[in-house]
Image (cartoon, rainbow, N blue to C red):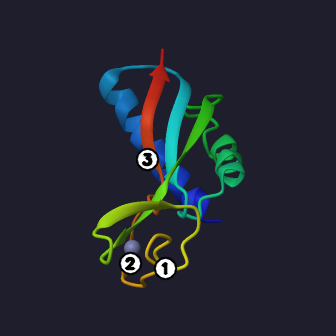
């Protein structure tokens, strides 16, 4: 499960913050992931509950935000948000497209601590 290693690096980052900022407990964590990242929110929560035990983040509430995906079309010369990526521009139906957003794996947006 890919989520395990994502959560592992997230927890390492939080522990570093905790040491530097001197907080004892994390109440809420706001995360974001790209629509096409392949990260499964339920799997991520499961991994988090398991791996956060005994850390400052144990029992923290997780909020997941899904970031929209977009492709860049060379034909249209602009970014276009897409629901599905089938390598074709939904506006001009050209195939000169690249995925520019939506593959970000896991980003820490906000931490609520005490
Ligand atoms: Zn286009």
Mark 3: give few (<14), some (14-19) or many (20+) Cα within 10 Å. Answer: some
Measured Cα–Cα span from mark 1 to mark 3: 28 Å
Residue at (56% x, 26% y) in the render: 28
- Lower sequence index among marks 3 and 2: 2
- Lower sequence index among marks 2 and 1: 1
The residue that mark 3 highlights is 107
| Residue 23 coordinates in the image, percent (x, y) | 42, 19
Ligand 1 under 8 Å from disc 2 Cβ: yes
Mark 2: give few (<14), some (14-19) or many (20+) Cα within 10 Å. Answer: many
State which image quarter holds ligand 1.
Answer: bottom left
The residue that mark 2 highlights is 97
Residue at (32% x, 78% y) in the render: 75
Tell me: residue 54, above or below residue 73: above
Q: Are marks 2 and 1 in contact (CB under 8 Å)?
A: yes
Front residue of 6 and 55: 6
Query: In this rendering, which labeled residue sits more in front, label 3 or label 2?
Result: 2
Look at the image and tell me in which quarter the N terminus lies. bottom right
The residue that mark 1 highlights is 88
């Amino acid at each position: 499960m890919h989520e395990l290693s994502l959560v592992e690096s997230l927890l390492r980052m939080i522990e570093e913050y905790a040491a530097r900022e001197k907080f004892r407990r994390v109440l809420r964590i706001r995360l974001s992931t790209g629509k096409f990242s392949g990260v499964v929110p339920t799997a991520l929560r499961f991994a988090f509950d398991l791996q956060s035990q005994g850390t400052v983040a144990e029992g923290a509430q997780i909020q997941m935000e899904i970031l929209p995906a977009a492709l860049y079309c060379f034909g249209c010369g602009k970014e276009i948000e897409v629901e599905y990526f089938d390598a074709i521009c939904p506006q001009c139906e050209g195939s000169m497209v690249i995925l520019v957003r939506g593959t970000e794996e896991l980003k820490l947006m906000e931490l609520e601590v005490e």
